[in-house]
Amino acid sequence: MLELINVTKTFGDIAALSDISFKVDDGEFVFISGPSGAGKTTLLRLLLREIKPNQGEIILDGKNIAKLSSKEVPRLRQHIGTIFQDFKVIPERTVAENVEVALAVIGLPKNEWPARTEHVLRLVGLSDRANLFPSQLSGGELQRVSMARALVVNPKIILADEPTGNLDWETADKIMDLFEKINQEGKTIIMATHHKLIINKLKKRVIELKDGKVISRGASLPQKKEKKVDESEKEM
Amino acid sequence: MTRIHIKTAWDHMRRAPFQALSAIFVLSITFFVITVLSALVYASGETLKYFETRPQVIAFLKDTATTEQISQLQTRLQQDSRINDVSFITKEEALEIYKEATADNPLLSELVSPSIFPASLEFSLTDLAFAEDVIQEVKQEEIVDQIGFTASLGGENTLSDVVSRLRTITFYIRLGGGAFAFLLASTSFLVLIVIIGMRMTTRRGEIEILDLIGATPGFIRSPIILEAIMYALTGVFVGWLLAFLLVLYSTPTIVGYFGEIPVLPRDTLQLFTLFGIMLGGELLTGFFLALSGSALAVSRVKRR
């Protein structure tokens, strides 16, 4: 479970986040929404411990990650899957190698890499692209590589910062279907987006930010199970 | 885990071959010169040792000297801390030496018999500064007829001059060689820092990604440091090999020119051992250069 308690982050005189508090349960899918400059990215950077809050606590699985030493940060990040708007794939490595890098980072024995990589590439629909380089892929495919890399380490939580920001609606829709599928497998997903269509389509809890403050915490919607049924019906 | 870092380092070298070649080239030149200088320092040291330890004083003995008297004098000389390598040369051995020296003209040796050569005690001095005192003391011995100084062909001061000049030359070879080697090693160090710094800059995106997905600083740095080590070890080996081949090629000429002065080991095994020791030392130096250079480059880029 993730809980933010009175978190404030300032950059000089500018308050990026002011006194933020909310909870995210295990397996939940939460949108962080709001206009540009609302503090969505700052919030995700705090969760990833790229930056420290000026005050407040960020509790992940009972541990205040704001208090982690810099040596403990890599370990934290190894348990968080991150997906970015600009994909952040390594251009000199193939799709499979980009995924394997994450496995090398967590120190998984090399003989276990092929099975894990193959599994996630199949999940994101890139099995036939494993040996291609990022320059040979479309935007949607690059985002799938990014998702595969995030998933392959079997993270407890997935942070996605505007993952559809660089994609057309059709591709974005497919990516969101994938996110939903991942969420149905039990992963907690926190996604920052200002894409209203996506938010409306998935009907998940929305935490709305404005000028660094939470203006709506939303509520966990009970459609999760219904959606699951819908999806399985769709697949059938 | 190391294998993935080696592969990454190798991939980076392949992707920027000119950077890799320039690093290896500079390091090869550095270690080629260092190997040649080391050989030169060894040769000058051996030459100096040769001149310092060759018999410098010959005490020609009277024909009346008994074996017991000779033995007593030899023992006394051996116990003297100023004297080294005392040896007794019989009349017969003196004739043999004479024959060898006049081998070009057999007529000269046919005209002489062992009886005309005096037996002698030959020895060298730990320091030529003791020469005068030792000669005076040995002259007082009852069984000693005359004292000869090895370099008497050119006057008594000649050997002293040669040794003194050799010492100066050796000193300057060591000093100049050391300074030159230091200068080259510093250049290599800077080149490594620049190339690793460039590598870090071009890999900035990848480093950022690795950092975000939880790579430890050690994981991120390892391929970069390994790359520097690969440059250094390749450079060391190439430089050393070139110098070794050069020495092997020129050994017959060098040995022929210097004659009995052992500027290089004549035994092949000893020569290989000498160069093996040099290679070991240079690999360690290269490793240290690569480790410190890359660590410095990484920390500098990280600070920016």
Image: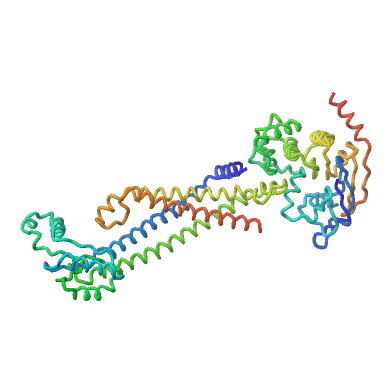
Residue reaching furthest to the left: B111
Residue reaching furthest to the top: A236
State whether residue A3 is above or below residue B155.
above
Q: x and y percent of residue B181 in the render?
A: 44, 60
| The quadrant where residue B13 appears | top right
Quadrant location of the C terminus of chain A in the rendered image: top right
- The residue located at (86%, 40%) in the rendering is A27
| The quadrant where residue B145 appears | bottom left
Tell whether B103 sits left or right of B20: left
Q: Is residue A139 visible in the rendered structure shown here?
A: no
Tell whether A75 sits left or right of B271: right
Q: x and y percent of residue A86 in the render?
A: 74, 44
User: Front-most of A195 and B146?
Assistant: B146
Q: x and y percent of residue A139 in the render?
A: 73, 37
User: Front-most of B100 and B219?
Assistant: B100
Tell whether B154 sits left or right of B197: left
Q: Is residue A3 visible in the rendered structure shown here?
A: yes
Q: x and y percent of residue B177 in the render?
A: 40, 62
